[in-house]
């Protein structure tokens, strides 16, 4: 015998509309009543009809996610956290992995997501042309950025400030010859490397340390790239005594390069990263921590809130804090090392 929403309402002692709101995660239902309804539904073996719910609400119950590099740790972690929040609210995720400029251009030209999703979470919006294309969908939008973006819920850290904290830590330890392993914005116009480099330059200027371009290398935001970049720095006539890596993955590669050259952090060189990667604590990496999974979950929650309260409008820019995590890879420069 099929169990209906009316049966659940009768068992829980509430109206059918209250049951509907509760099971779809909508506001206006107390946690106590929501738990009571969930228990009644479970005891009766009630399963909501996805197609009926979709027809009744006029929604697809699907969230589009546009990702540049699903295989990269940051984007993968953000996606996992967001997907958990969407799934708990009864939404499916339609993933578009745009790993190349050609794939990305094709997506934003054809916009296959149109009329297929209720909202879009874009892990990276490169320029205003892409932003305009997403705005044309007429659905709630969210992305990750360092500044507000009209029409979008924006969640992110202040990359420039985070980099400043990392380099200032090295300066406060007494380092004057400080290298940086970074990246380039490339064809994707990624602003994170630009902002973090500016933070590096800010602190050098504030400390009266002349900028030496030979101490900057490109690590491509990968472990392998960080290893190659550190190898370049070690080959310099005057290697740095400390290195700021713009990501923990590049910092891990830098530490591997030190080991291959029979050097050690922080005795021979201090290394600090940025992210607080899940392996950072394991290897004792000093870093600037950002809540990566937390940002994904927060963006998902804010998107769902817009769907539940469409008249409220986008919440704008949500900036999450970063913090210095002191571990084992930074220390004052060795007194016998030239500065």
Image (cartoon, rainbow, N blue to C red):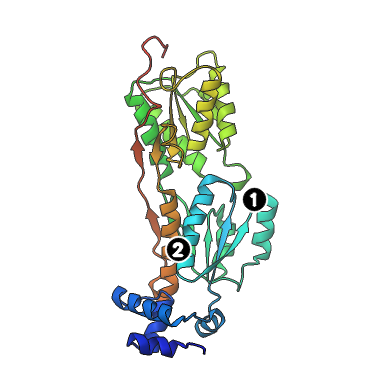
Residue 40, compared with residue 247, is above or below; it is: below
Residue 59: assigned label: none
Residue placed at 45% from the left, 36% from the top? 198
Compared with residue 288, is residue 175 higher up or lower down, i.e. above or below? above
Q: Measuring from the top left, give residue 119's x and y in whole percent.
A: 52, 68
Q: Which residue is mark 2?
A: 85
From this viewpoint, is residue 196 visible?
Answer: yes
Badge 2: few (under 14), some or many (20 or more) residues near its Cα, within 10 Å?
some
Count residues near mark 1 (Cα–Cα under 10 Å), then give few for <14, some for 14-19, many for 20+. Answer: few
Quadrant assignment, res 221: top right
Image spot of residue 133 (x, y percent): 59, 63
Q: Earlier in the sequence, mark 2 or mark 1?
A: 2
Query: Residue at image x 68%, y 65%?
Result: 110
Q: Determine which residue is flagged by label 1.
A: 99
Residue 259 locus on image (x, y percent): 52, 21
For marks 2 and 1, give the one nearer the viewer. Answer: 2
Q: Is residue 247 visible?
A: no
Q: Quadrant of the C terminus?
A: top left
* Of the pair 32 and 179, the residue shown nearer to us: 32
Q: Nearer the viewer, residue 181 or 14?
A: 14
Hey, which quadrant is residue 170 in on the image? Answer: top left
Q: Left of 99 or right of it: where is 245?
A: left
């Amino acid at each position: 015998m099929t169990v209906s929403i009316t049966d659940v309402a009768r068992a829980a002692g509430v109206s059918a509309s209250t049951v509907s709101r509760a099971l779809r995660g909508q506001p206006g239902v107390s946690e106590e009543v929501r738990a009571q309804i969930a228990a009644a539904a479970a005891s009766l073996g009630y399963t909501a009809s996805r197609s009926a719910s979709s027809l009744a609400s006029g929604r697809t119950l699907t969230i589009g996610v546009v990702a540049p590099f699903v295989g990269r740790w940051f984007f993968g972690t953000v996606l996992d956290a967001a997907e958990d929040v969407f799934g708990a609210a009864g939404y499916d995720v339609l993933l578009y992995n745009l790993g190349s400029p050609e794939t990305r251009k094709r997506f934003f030209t054809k916009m296959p997501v149109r009329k297929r999703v209720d909202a879009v979470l874009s892990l990276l919006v490169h320029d205003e042309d892409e932003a305009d294309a997403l705005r044309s969908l007429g659905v709630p939008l969210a992305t990750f950025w360092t500044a507000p973006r009209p029409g979008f819920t924006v969640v992110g850290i202040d990359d420039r400030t985070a980099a400043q904290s990392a380099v200032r830590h090295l300066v406060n330890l007494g380092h004057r010859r400080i290298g940086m392993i970074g990246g380039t914005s490339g064809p994707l116009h990624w602003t994170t490397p630009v902002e973090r480099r500016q933070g590096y330059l800010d602190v050098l200027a504030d400390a009266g340390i002349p900028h030496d371009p030979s101490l900057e290398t490109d690590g491509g935001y990968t472990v392998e790239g960080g290893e190659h970049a550190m190898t370049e720095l070690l080959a310099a006539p005057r290697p740095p005594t400390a290195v700021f890596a713009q990501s923990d993955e590049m910092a891990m590669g830098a530490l591997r390069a030190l080991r291959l050259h029979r050097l050690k952090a922080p005795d021979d060189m201090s290394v600090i990263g940025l992210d607080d990667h899940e392996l950072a604590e394991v290897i004792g990496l000093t870093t600037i921590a950002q809540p990566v999974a937390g940002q994904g979950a927060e963006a998902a929650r804010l998107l769902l809130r817009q769907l539940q309260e469409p008249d409220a409008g986008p919440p704008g820019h949500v900036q999450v804090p970063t913090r210095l995590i002191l571990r084992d890879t930074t220390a004052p420069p060795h007194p016998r090392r030239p500065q």
